[in-house]
Image (cartoon, rainbow, N blue to C red):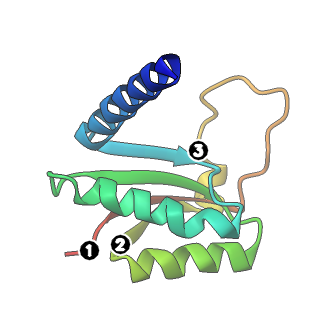
Amino acid sequence: REESLAAQQECDAGTRRTLTEFFAADVLLAADVIYDVSVIESLVLVMRNFLRASSSAKFALFAIMKRNLTTFETLMRHLDQHNVECAWLARGDACEQLPYVFPCKFNQPRHDVCIAKLTRRC
């Protein structure tokens, strides 16, 4: 029982430290995280809470692959419902022109990729 309590306290301390560092950041980066409709609202809520924390200069950069129109529309609906503003930085052909940063054995076509800057709506 004591070991279990000690493990729980260590986990709680680690979680608090992680959350403190998360909310202290200025930029949230995410790529290829929009594919399961059942977790989109939770993802948007985490992002909204990040954007609300302290600085109004915070933003998130998301690289999104439009694999499924329903999933993409669900994301856009939840962003709107939770007052998250979406500004497209690159879409479609513009993404095809972006340089590859890391060497790849297979280069995925980028015509369905969108890169967005997400901010809190005032």
Q: At 53% across and 69% down in the image, what residue appears?
A: 41
Circles 3 and 2, Cβ within 8 Å, touching? The answer is no
Where residue 102 sits in the image (x, y, percent)? 65, 25
Instruction: Count all numbered tags in the image, as a single digit.
Output: 3
Q: Residue furthest top?
A: 3
Does residue 85 sit above or below 105 in this rendering?
A: below
Residue at x-position 47% and y-position 18%: 2
Quadrant containing the C terminus in the rendered view: bottom left
Residue identifier under label 2: 85
Three-letter code for the amino acid on which mark 2 is drawn: Glu
Most distant residue in the right direction: 106
| Residue 81 percent location from the top left of the image | 41, 82
Kindly identify the residue that appears in the image at 65 percent across and 50 percent down: 32
Along the polypeptide, which appears first: circle 2 or circle 1? 2
In the displayed structure, 80 sits above or below 63; it is below
Which one is earlier in the sequence, the residue at label 3 or at label 1? 3
Q: Residues within 10 Å of mark 1 (few under 14, many from 20)?
A: some
**Quick check: 42 left or right of 103?**
left
Q: Amino acid at mark 3?
A: Leu
Q: CA distance from mark 3 to mark 1?
A: 28 Å
Residue 117 visible, this orientation: no
Q: Secondary structure at mark 1?
A: loop
Q: Are marks 2 and 1 in contact (CB under 8 Å)?
A: yes
- Between residues 37 and 18, which one lies in front from this camera angle? 18
Which quadrant of the structure image shows residue 40? bottom right
- Residue at image x 26%, y 74%? 121
Give the Cα separation between the discs numbered 2 and 1: 5 Å
**Residue, disc 3:** 98
